[in-house]
Image: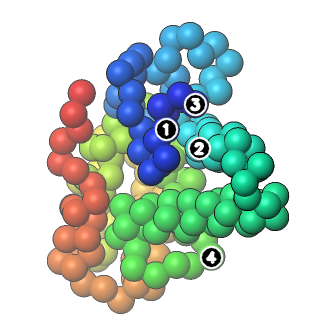
């Protein structure tokens, strides 16, 4: 998403240049004229906020600064809440716990190092079973010891959920597509 293609509904409408994020690269830039990486994948939430700040600026003659700031603060909270929920869904976590961000960051660190396919990683993870120390995802990683260490923590977190594999896998497969369009 760039500054010029976010609609008032928060949708992005773009005719290019665009690209698809196959292997997980937070600093991926699809716009070849974006030399500084302002619109990189990892900066998308900040770009959305910046866009809304510009909209608020243009509405300031009609709406009080206090009301606009409250709305911007609410956006940030809503974004973080929705992102956290989506990532927990992708991991098959039904409840929120303190270490969830660390668990996700650990997986992302492995994915970055291994240049893992974002879509495939989460889909294969959705086939994992709580009681099995081996995951179909393991074969995607060269550094299997690092994956095994992360997966042990993930399995421990799944046990805290007290949700059976079928229910968890169904939820995960609902948000982790089998194929990515490229």
Horizontal side, residue 69 vs residue 139: left or right: right
Tell me how far mark 1 sits from mark 3, CA to CA: 7 Å
Q: Would you call the spot at circle 4 few (<14 residues within 10 Å), some (14-19), or many (20 or more)?
A: few
Cβ atoms at labels 2 and 1 below 8 Å apart: yes
Q: Would you call the spot at circle 2 few (<14 residues within 10 Å), some (14-19), or many (20 or more)?
A: many
Q: Position of residue 40 (x, y in %)?
A: 56, 29
Tell me how far mark 3 sits from mark 4, CA to CA: 34 Å
The residue that label 4 is drawn on is 98
Horizontal side, residue 130 vs residue 78: left or right: left
SS assignment at label 4: loop
Looking at marks 1 and 4 on the same chain, the residue that comes earlier in the sequence is marked by: 1
SS assignment at label 3: helix
The residue that label 2 is drawn on is 48
Horizontal side, residue 101 vs residue 136: left or right: right
Horizontal side, residue 88 vs residue 92: left or right: right
* The image quarter in which residue 165 lies: bottom left
The residue that label 3 is drawn on is 3
Q: Would you call the spot at circle 3 few (<14 residues within 10 Å), some (14-19), or many (20 or more)?
A: some
Q: Is residue 80 above or below residue 124?
A: below
* The image quarter in which residue 73 lies: bottom right
The residue that label 1 is drawn on is 6
Looking at marks 2 and 4 on the same chain, the residue that comes earlier in the sequence is marked by: 2
Looking at marks 2 and 1 on the same chain, the residue that comes earlier in the sequence is marked by: 1
Q: How many marks?
A: 4
Residue nearest the viewer, comparing 67 with 30: 67
Cβ atoms at labels 1 and 3 below 8 Å apart: yes
Q: Residue at x 34, y 36 (%)?
A: 117
Q: Residue at x 52, y 78 (%)?
A: 96
Q: Position of residue 69 (x, y in %)?
A: 77, 60
Instruction: Mark 1 vs mark 4: give the one in front.
Output: 1
Q: Is residue 160 above or below residue 79?
A: below
Residue extending farthest to the bottom is 162
């Amino acid at each position: 998403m760039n500054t010029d293609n976010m609609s008032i509904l928060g949708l992005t409408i773009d005719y290019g240049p665009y690209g698809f994020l196959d292997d997980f690269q937070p600093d991926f830039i699809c716009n070849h004229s974006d030399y500084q990486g302002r619109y990189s994948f990892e900066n998308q939430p900040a770009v959305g906020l910046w866009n809304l700040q510009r909209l608020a600026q243009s509405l300031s003659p009609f709406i009080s600064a206090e009301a606009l700031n409250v709305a911007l603060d609410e956006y940030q909270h809503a974004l973080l809440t929705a992102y956290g929920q989506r990532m927990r869904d992708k991991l098959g976590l039904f409840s929120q716990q303190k270490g969830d961000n660390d668990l996700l960051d650990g997986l992302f660190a492995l994915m970055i190092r291994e240049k893992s396919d974002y879509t495939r990683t989460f889909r294969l993870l959705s086939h994992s079973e709580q009681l099995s120390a081996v995951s179909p995802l393991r074969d995607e990683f060269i550094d299997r010891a690092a994956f095994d260490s992360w997966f042990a923590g993930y399995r421990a977190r799944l046990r805290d959920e007290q949700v059976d594999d079928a229910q968890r896998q169904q939820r995960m497969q609902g948000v982790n597509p089998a194929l990515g369009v490229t």
